[in-house]
Image (cartoon, rainbow, N blue to C red):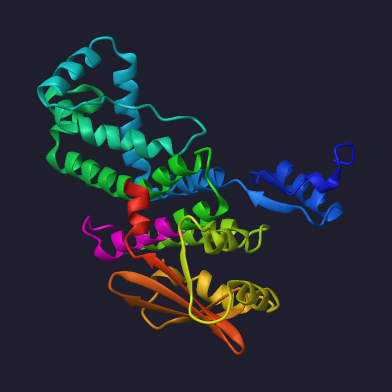
Amino acid sequence: MDLIGRERFAALASDNTGNTKLGRELAQAVVPTIIIVPDSCHNLSNTVKDITKIEYFVDCIGRMRVIITHFSHSSYSPTHLNAMRVVDAINKGLEAIGRTRFGTIYWAGYSVIRSLPAIVILVKTGGKFAWFTQLREYQGFELQLQQLVHILEPIARAIKCLEGLEVTVGDVYKLYVAITAVLRDFLEQNSLSLPKEVQEEVCSIINRRYDEMIHGPSGDLFLAGFFLDPGKCFVSLHAGSLLNSVQSMSKVPCCSECQRTNFRPRQLRHPVLRPLSSLTRIFGIPCQLTLKSGHFYFTFSRRNCSRVVMRLHSSAIRRWLTS
């Protein structure tokens, strides 16, 4: 760094393995102006890994691996499966699970669900797929696989988005909010009858990984990037100037205890998704959240400070994942 020039380094990005974590902390201790940026894809991949280790899903994932391994190694079965796919208009086959890319578990599970009707027709008797002929075991496997895929879907799709070339720190924040939004709706509706204890484990994992990423060594980097992104946030001023507002906000110390209360909930919720008229603090400034005509309105107000209203479409988060 000294050879190139310390002033040329703005941030250090890495995953949270022991060596890289220590290296970036030592570098920041020497050069305090450097911002530490954790690897969001690695964080989400570890989130998937933690969810797949839940005891409830272990048997389901094991059987899914057996199915994929059999059809990838056999020379006879894939031919018949491909023929059945043509008959049933299934455009894609089974996908393999990567050893270290845990997000591929979702894509593999989705491919098994997609091909399951054809596989059931091919499986007749005996062997490693004998449980296919047992109605209760087969229905239990299908239900658990559906539950697992629904939980992993927003995380896996967010990983795909974050692997893009033009991703900003604001996009990271938006996608983490989107994950909590989608999973919160899924767990509240619970249309697939996920057991309560499994829901609590999933909530605990999501909240822990969210805190690790958003409230980690990068501080308010992701929140600031989301708030200041001109391409995705519509900002209008009702009084004064934007410059005065930003200057006033920058002088107010951040209230860490209030942030911890609002951004680290026991349940899957977030300031963007909280009930109407709820109060929080962003950059230490009181924030009023309201919903009007399908839009979220963030109102920042302070004595002798301009009023800033940031408008976001309430459905923009889900469109980001499904587009």
Q: Nearer the viewer, residue 102 or 153?
A: 153
Percent of width and height locating residue 194: 28, 57
**Magenta region, mostly helix, strand or loop?**
helix
Percent of width and height locating residue 82: 20, 17
In the picture, measured across the screen, residue 76 lies left or right of residue 319, that is: left
Q: Nearer the viewer, residue 186 or 18?
A: 186
Percent of width and height locating residue 143: 22, 47
- Which quadrant holds the C terminus? top left
Quarter of the image for residue 108 reads top left
Percent of width and height locating residue 166: 53, 42
Residue 191 lies in magenta, yes or no? yes
In the picture, measured across the screen, residue 294 lies left or right of residue 269, that is: left
Q: Is residue 198 above or below residue 38?
A: below
At 19% from the left edge and 28% from the top edge, which residue is drawn? 130
Q: Nearer the viewer, residue 203 or 258?
A: 258
At 31% from the left edge and 37% from the top edge, which residue is drawn? 109
> Is residue 269 visible to the viewer in this orientation of the structure?
no
Q: Is residue 194 above or below residue 278?
A: above
Residue 220 lies in magenta, yes or no? no
Q: Is residue 59 above or below residue 68?
A: below
Tell me where the magenta segment starts and ends, as one range.
Answer: 177-195
Quarter of the image for residue 304 reads bottom right
In the picture as drawn, the residue positioned furthest to the bottom comes out as: 303
In the picture, measured across the screen, residue 302 lies left or right of residue 137, that is: right
Q: Nearer the viewer, residue 310 or 59?
A: 310
In the picture, measured across the screen, residue 260 lies left or right of residue 52, that is: right
